[in-house]
Amino acid sequence: MGKRKGEMVGGSVAAEQDRKEAAEGTAAEDKVVVGGGAEEDDGDQSFDELGLDSRLIRALLKKGVDKPTPIQQVAIPLILEGKDVVARAKTGSGKTFAYLLPMLQKLFGESGSTRRDGMRALVLVPTRELCQQVYNEVLSLIELCRVQLKVDQLTSGMQVSDMRAVMTGLPDIVVSTPGCIPKCFSSGVVQPTALSGSLEILVLDEADLLLSYGYEDDLRALTTHIPKRCQCLLMSATTSADVDKLKRLILHNPYILTLPEVANVKDDIIPKNVQQFWISCPGRDKLLYVLVLLKLELVQKKVLIFTNSIDTSYRLRLFIEKFGIRSAVLNAELPQNSRLHIIEQFNAGLFDYLIATDDGAVRDKELANGQKGESKKSRKHAKSKLDKEFGVVRGIDFKNVNTVINLDMPPSVAGYVHRIGRTGRAYSSGSSVSLVSSEEMNVFEEIKSFLGENENEESNVIATFPLLTDNAVEALRYRAEDVAKSVTRIAVRESRAQDLRNEILNSEKLKAHFEANPRDLDLLKHDTVLSKKAPAPHLRDVPDYLIDQKTQEARNMVKLTQAAMGNTNTYHKQRFKRKSRKSRDPLKTFKGEAQRKRKKDGALSNKDK
Ligand SMILES: Nc1ncnc2c1ncn2[C@@H]1O[C@H](COP(=O)(O)OP(=O)(O)OP(=O)(O)O)[C@@H](O)[C@H]1O
């Protein structure tokens, strides 16, 4: 990495000084700008003072965003000046607006080449979910600003004819994944000469993850066509050799914006507003422990639970369902429409518990473990069913997640950082609870030491979860063990297959319907019960006598905190309840509507005769 120019107290001051040096031609190497401190010390610069266009400021206000985050304060002016920038800031710190706002402003201001035959800005992200998220954000900003800019998505799942149609419309901005690049070039959807003639801004978002997805060759294929004048931006939550590699591959003498928590103090790589806890528990008791946390309401909703395998996610879903707790699952096996819709509904507050299985490495492990004895061919088939471009933790902006639970520990430190980063987004608070078995102690120690915990000192970065008593665990043990026995491997396999069939059916059947009636999306549920039997009353309602005093108090405290934060989530639920679900469920009325339409059309054509 380049030479450090000095530690600064305020990011904007540092940027100013660096800009001066750059202007004087004294900065030959990368320019390191150490940004402002934690969120609470967010300086007093407004978007206006950063030089942001008034249309964008008004659009932000409509979104409830009125002051820039530290990374935005430092990045926006530099990007507006046309500098190449590498921005490293923790998860949920607002990196997306940090590049989108100045990028859009630059595209508003200049019309680009009038005879351009390619895109003006290209944003590359590692997953399709993220692609959709960034696309939605750009589209909504453009609409709120009422400017004539066109944004489109290109993903490798698209047919070449659809891609061609997108590019014929000559979008100003394209949001895509690097995996899509070879297909675009080989099919002629993107002409290299058009790209080099028109590209003004290239953004690599979630750069720390791009190479881990095996996109290096795809990115190399792209670099040869990026014109020298193109401004390149690289955004990342963690630092890694991969980020440096990408930087060398694509950027020219960039400004390195590093918030101090990422650069120096490792324990701050996780937002300060996230409290991290752990519970030591035997692997075989993990379902029981999650049950205690959820059923006795010792953690705040909404809850995102991570597992390392899809089977475990269904086992947990079936298990908690028997106790009257509904949840949905999210994984690489589900069709893309379903995945996007599950995230949308969870964000809208339509259900409180989402069980997610993340990470390519984990998927490979699942394939290796779960399908022992199966033929090579069926393993290959199974692998092809999993979406390579899927990623739950990679930058997805889950809204209002109060608790992240690691039922399984992630296999790496980076996995931990990205999982925990799904809570405590922007200025909100959150907590995480990791269940650690003795087999997972090694990775847990690695995570703790990465976060700056000293073995000899009393741990304070990841504290022991204080609200769980042995009594509470033992009170539910008998029932839990009994129920766990009924969640057999066969039951899990059947539920998983059934759920997948349903999701594929929904996804296909409803695609056209939802295109015409986007509001009906609310009515399609993903947290339906898997089992045909309703939960037994003695499992659904935990009698008070089973709950010890300390747990009662803890539960009340969590409820009070949740209420104080206005996080009762009743608005969405009421909105959802108000509609008569059965009569308006598009899965039930879809056919009827289509038939009615056909009848009507028939009647009309009969009349015409
Ligand atoms: N200035 C701001 N004020 C308030 N909220 C903001 C601001 N900027 C962004 N946000 C919100 O903060 C949330 C997190 O932002 P974003 O997704 O950009 O984080 P990120 O840094 O990219 O995180 P990750 O590394 O996990 O992808 C989003 O919901 C976004 O709308």
Image: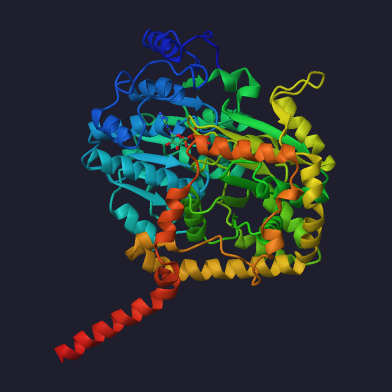
Q: Quadrant of the C terminus?
A: bottom left
Q: What is the total number of numbered labels drawn onto the structure image?
A: 0
Horizontal and vertical percent for residue 582?
A: 45, 71
Question: Residue most toward the left?
Answer: 608
Q: Quadrant of the N terminus?
A: top right
| Image position of 391 (left or right of 451) | left
Residue at image position (49%, 9%) is 9
Vertical placement of 213 versus 431: above or below? below
| Image position of 55 (left or right of 247) | left
**Is 50 in front, or is 27?**
50
Colouring convention used in this rendered image of the protein: rainbow
Horizontal and vertical percent for residue 35?
A: 49, 17
**Is 489 in front, or is 205?**
489
Vertical placement of 397 versus 376: above or below? above
| Image position of 461 (left or right of 168) | right
Residue at image position (38%, 68%) is 512
Vertical placement of 203 versus 364: above or below? above
**Is 564 in front, or is 79?**
564
* Residue 573 makes an appearance in the image: yes
Horizontal and vertical percent for residue 118?
A: 32, 45
Horizontal and vertical percent for residue 585?
A: 43, 69
* Residue 156 makes an appearance in the image: no
